[in-house]
Image (cartoon, grey):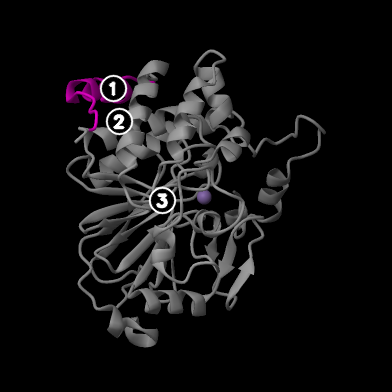
Amino acid sequence: MTVPFRIPTTDLDYCLEQLLEHKPPKILPSDTIQQLCHTLKSQLLAVPNIMPLQSPITVVGDIHGQYHDLLEIFQIGGSPPNTNYLFLGDYVDRGYYSVETISLLIVLKLRYPERIFLIRGNHESRTITTNYGFYSEVLSKYNGSIEVWSYITDLFDYLPLGATIDGKIFATHGGLSPSCQQLDQIRTVDRLKEVPHDGIMADLVWSDPDPEIMDFKLSPRGAGYLFGYDVMQKFCHDNDLVQLIRAHQLCNEGYVSYWQGKCLTVWSAPNYCYRCGNKASVLEILSSNYLSKESDSNGLKGKVNKQGVLPGQYFNVFEASPENNEDTSSGKSVNGINSIDNNTGERDIFQSFFQEKPNRQYIDYFL
Ligand SMILES: [Mn+2]
């Protein structure tokens, strides 16, 4: 029998100290990152595509390199290992601290493997990170070397695609897929690869719920699908689930509840990209002692509270950290949302989007 290699706890604690006890945080050396990624990959090989998890657990949505807001989450939600955390992906890109954010999550996962769980988002990909910030951040923080980017994006291939909580809740980054009626179909996907453009794996990280439609429709994002209540209802019924919890869409109030709590979006990057002015949240699941058979169609009505969550659940809403505000006023550009396109000199479409839609209703169609 082979014994999986483990990094000594003292070494992991030293990494945590580098990241947590310096301001600004110290980045870890390239060969340390290599060792951390190598070890975590070997451990993730044994982890199924859908992790069976239990409450109590706190679910975290997109972070997008907003390191100081991640620390804020540990302030309001409890710091590891005192609170169990399930992170729903999109750790990198957009914000200025993707390197520190993913480094901290990797070290925490290795230090507290039964307390911290990480799944894959659409940004945990070589293609997306090349275009939306992580790649260039590594280049500038590691003196022109992309080694750290390749160690970490290789690790992304090993991340699981979802989790169940108490067997009754399904959690994934984006949403459902027309190619997948049963959770078992996800369990048999070969996930150890770059996120493909289509198929179950792509749809899980790219799709979004849409209360305006029925069935599935192609997503305006260019990957994944929009799915309606009928799809959600059937998927829950067929898989004996009560709820889908996902991230992937910016929410002004930090969260959105669809369909009497049957689907929740949790968004954990406050003042997204240092300019959206939105709140953020984490979803605390204390228990899930409800029966799925009773919760079909109208069964959940009257059971959801004013946040639109099920009994035993609570959205802990928070605002941007003081450091986020410092970065906001420093006026640096954010990847993909620069005000002037360097190549054409034309105004970036994102910039005009903010001006045309001051209520930010459709911002969620950002990648
Ligand atoms: Mn996403």
Residue 190 belongs to magenta span: no
Horizontally, residue 74 falls left or right of residue 270, namely: left
The magenta-colored residue range is: 4-24
* Residue 29 in view: no
Q: How crowded is mark 2: few (under 14 residues within 10 Å), some or many (20 or more)?
A: many
* Residue to which mark 1 is pinned: 15
Residue 14 belongs to magenta span: yes
Out of 282 and 238, give the one closest to the viewer.
238
First of labels 2, 1 by sequence position: 1
Please state which amino acid type lies under the numbered disc 3: Gly
Residue 351 image point, x, y percent: 69, 44
Q: What element carries label 2?
A: helix
The numbered mark at residue 63 is: none
Which image quadrant for residue 130? top right
Extreme residue in the front direction: 1
Please state which amino acid type lies under the numbered disc 2: Val
First of labels 2, 3 by sequence position: 3
Please state which amino acid type lies under the numbered disc 1: Cys
Extreme residue in the top direction: 143
Q: Residues within 10 Å of mark 1 (few under 14, many from 20)?
A: many
Q: Are marks 2 and 1 in contact (CB under 8 Å)?
A: yes
* Residue to which mark 2 is pinned: 107
Horizontally, residue 99 falls left or right of residue 168, namely: right
Q: Residues within 10 Å of mark 3 (few under 14, many from 20)?
A: many
